[in-house]
Image (tube, rainbow, N blue to C red):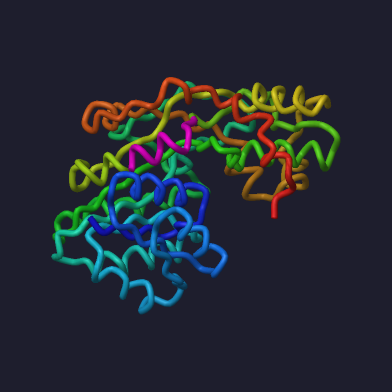
Amino acid sequence: MHVIVFGASGYLGGALVERFVAAGHSVTGAVRSDAAAANVRDLGAVPALVDLTDPHGSLGLLRDADAVVFAAQLMLEPEYRVVSAMLDSLDGTGKTFIFTSGTAVLSQRTDGEWSADVFAEEDDFVPSKYIGARRNTEDLVLAANRRGVRGIVVRPSMIWGRGGCPMIRNLYASAAQTGSVCYVGRGLNLYSNVHVDDVAELFHLALEKGKPGALYHAVSGETNFRTIAEAVARDLDVPTRSIDLAEAVGIWDKFTAIIAFSVCSRSRAPRSRIELGWMPDPDRLDILEEVGHPALRRPAS
């Protein structure tokens, strides 16, 4: 199968390229720079330089693809427009389109408190005030089956592994800036989490046997932010400190403070496990194993 991965140079995108190549697929990795193209080539895929703001360049790639995996990171409105244009281009072809969403769409702002609410793929929820509009893009993809496109949505929880977890990197950054590893409020809130290699396996299974119009979650465990912050503090031999939202915005930025560290996002993945037979690797269940990875200690570029 010829698979095109948009966002192939990203944290998740690179893992997807690697998994699809290992499965024997012919993979094209759509990227934005020559440096990213070299990385994709090293993974065994063919790079393609694409600017997603230019629909002609990206849509031209779809003609030779059997499957399209959208793992690019865009703002919500451009993302919707690009995905809509791609689905229009694929209309009636029977090809596969897999969209990468995330459980931020169902997150609840709790300012550091734990929430009892936990959501499976088919559960109703009130979309997040801040990023819930992504559900419009999800719905567009899920409805593509009626247009002759095998549309599938994958919602990963907080991804970690290989020293790439953005949220843990931000905890290290808070220590570099303030001398303490910071968390919001009581730090009892959390995102359910999953290792990046297990997410890649779920995408592979979705490509191989996912049902048209299906939504699949990727989640293998959960650990609250205070516990992770305490682990980072032990690694650095510094204290932890509770902060309010205003200070969190100053340490990180408004988006990170609200969307990452002030919400609770708990999820389950029964459809992924039952329908696809997805099973996270038992040796990749503890996010605290990510703490101490050298890559997380480096300042973000």
> Which quadrant of the structure image shows residue 182?
top right
Q: Name the residue: 60% across, 38% down.
A: 163
Magenta segment includes 196: yes
Specify the segment rendered in magenta.
Answer: 193-203
| Residue 161, image x, y percentages | 54, 35
On-image quarter of the C terminus? bottom right
- Nearer to the camera, 186 or 270: 270
Q: Is 36 drawn above or below residue 300 in the view shown?
A: below
Relative side of 35 to 283, left or right: right
- Nearer to the camera, 105 or 201: 201
Q: Is 199 drawn above or below residue 232 in the view shown?
A: below
Q: Name the residue: 41% across, 61% down.
A: 29
On-image quarter of the N terminus? bottom left
- Nearer to the camera, 292 or 261: 292
Q: Is 208 drawn above or below residue 67 in the view shown?
A: above
Q: How many marks?
A: 0
Q: Magenta span: helix, strand or loop, mainly?
A: helix
| Residue 259, image x, y percentages | 58, 43
> Which quadrant of the structure image shows residue 238?
top right
Relative side of 300 to 122, left or right: right
| Residue 31, image x, y percentages | 47, 65
Q: Name the residue: 51% across, 24% down.
A: 222
| Residue 121, image x, y percentages | 31, 34
- Nearer to the camera, 166 or 295: 295
